[in-house]
Image (spheres, rainbow, N blue to C red):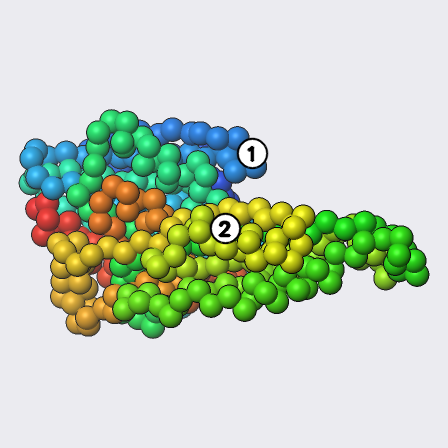
Amino acid sequence: MPIIDPVELAAKLISVPSITPASGAVFDVLDETLTALGFIVHRFTTGEAPDGPTENMVAIREAGPGPHFGFAGHLDVVPPGEGWSGDPFLARIDAGRLIGRGSNDMKSAIAAMAAATAALEQQRGTLSFLITGDEEGYATYGTPRIVDWLNQRGIRPDMILIGEPTSEQRLGDTVKIGRRGSVNMWIDVPGTQGHVAYPHKADNPVGKLARIVAAIDAIHLDDGTDAFPPSNLEFTSLDTPTHASNVIPGGATAQLNIRFNNLQHGPDLVQQVTERAQAIEPRAVVRARISGEAFLTPPGELYDLVVGAIETECGISPALSTSGGTSDGRFLIQLCPVVDFGLPNATMHKLDESAAVEDIHALTRIYGRIIAKLLG
C-alpha cells in the first residue's frame, strides 16, 4: 500500500482549480490516489447550468463482513477573489502553513482521509469516500445525487464523517453533531412605475415592502433547544429595478435568510412569511429555496469513535456543537448518523486561505485512529 503525505496530496488538489460546481481534473487526482489504495471508484456527472454540471464520486473498498464507514467531503471551492499574496491555485508553504484556495475548506481534510486510509490495515467491513463537486453552491446535483446513487444500489453506510473545518481555536476543540436548516426567500411586491412628481399616476411598492419587512422582522420564531440556538431571521437585501432619483419603481424585492433549528421546518417558515406578506399586500409573491432541514445526530458509536480519537491525539474533549452554517450532512443524515469534524476554520473562504501543516498531519492521525478502531 503506498504511503501518502497528506500535505503533498492537499497541495496537488489545491493546484487544480475547482470553483464550484467542479468536475474533471481535480477528481482525476483523487481517483488516481484512491484506485492505488484498492478502491473501486465510481464517477458520474449530472445537471446543467446554472447549477451544474456537477461531478460526484463514490469510492468503495471492502474487506469482508463488518461495519461500513464513510468519509464525505467536497472538492469544489469558492471563487478566490482579488488581493491574494500569490496565485490562489498554486499551493505553497509559508511559516508552517499550506496556503491556497481550498487548503482549509476542505481539500486538506480529503487528503488527510486518503493518507489515513493508506496507513490502515483494513481487516473487515467497508470504507467509502463520498465526494461531491458542489457543496459550495446550491448542491442541486451534488450530495443529493450521491444519496440517490447509494439508495438505488442498496448501499447504506453505518456512519459518516464529513471533513468540514469545524475546529474553532485549536484542532479538536469542536465537533458538529448537527446543523441548522437554511432557507432563502425573496419577497416581490408589484407596483406601477411613474414619475415622482406625479405619484397619483403610479403605484409605489416601496412603502408596502417596508411594512412587510417590519412585520416579518418582528416574528419571534423560538427560544432554541438544549442542542440548538434560537432560529434567526435576517434580511439580506432590499432592491428596486431602477435606482434613478426621480422614478417610482415598478416593483420592489426584499431578500431574507432563516437559519432554523429542529423546532422548525422549511415549508412552514415559507408559509408563515407568505401569510405575513400577503396580509399587507395580497399581490406580494414569496419565492423560496430551502437549502436543507435541521438535523441532529444522537449520541452513539460515531460520537464515541470521533471524541475518543480526538482525546487521544489532542488531549482535549471537544465541544459537541450545532452552530455555524449548513453542511452536506443535511442530505447524508437520510442514510445514517453523521458528524462533521476537521481543521480550525479561521481562514476558510478568506484571502490567503491556509491550514497549519502540523494540523493536517494531526488530522490524518485522528482520522486514522477512527477507522483503525472500527475496521482494523
Tell me if I can see residue 35 in this picture. no
> Residue visible at 31% across and 36% down?
147
- Mark 1, Cα crowd under 10 Å, few <14 / some 14-19 / many 20+, is few
- The percent position of residue 266, horizontal first and vertical second, equals 43, 51
Assign a secondary structure to mark 2. helix
Q: Quadrant of residue 167?
A: bottom left
Residue 233 as seen in the image, left or right of residue 329 = right
Query: Which of these two is toward me, 317 or 158?
Result: 158
Three-letter code for the amino acid on which mark 1 is drawn: Ala
Report the residue that reaches farthest toward the top: 153
Three-letter code for the amino acid on which mark 2 is drawn: Gln
Assign a secondary structure to mark 1. loop
5 to 351, vertically: above or below: above
> Residue visible at 51% across and 66% down?
219
Q: Quadrant of residue 142?
A: top left
- The percent position of residue 369, horizontal first and vertical second, equals 14, 55
Q: Distance between the Cα atoms at labels 2 and 1?
A: 29 Å
- Mark 2, Cα crowd under 10 Å, few <14 / some 14-19 / many 20+, is few
The residue that label 2 is drawn on is 271
Tell me if I can see residue 208 in this picture. yes
Q: Quadrant of residue 126?
A: top left
The residue that label 1 is drawn on is 49
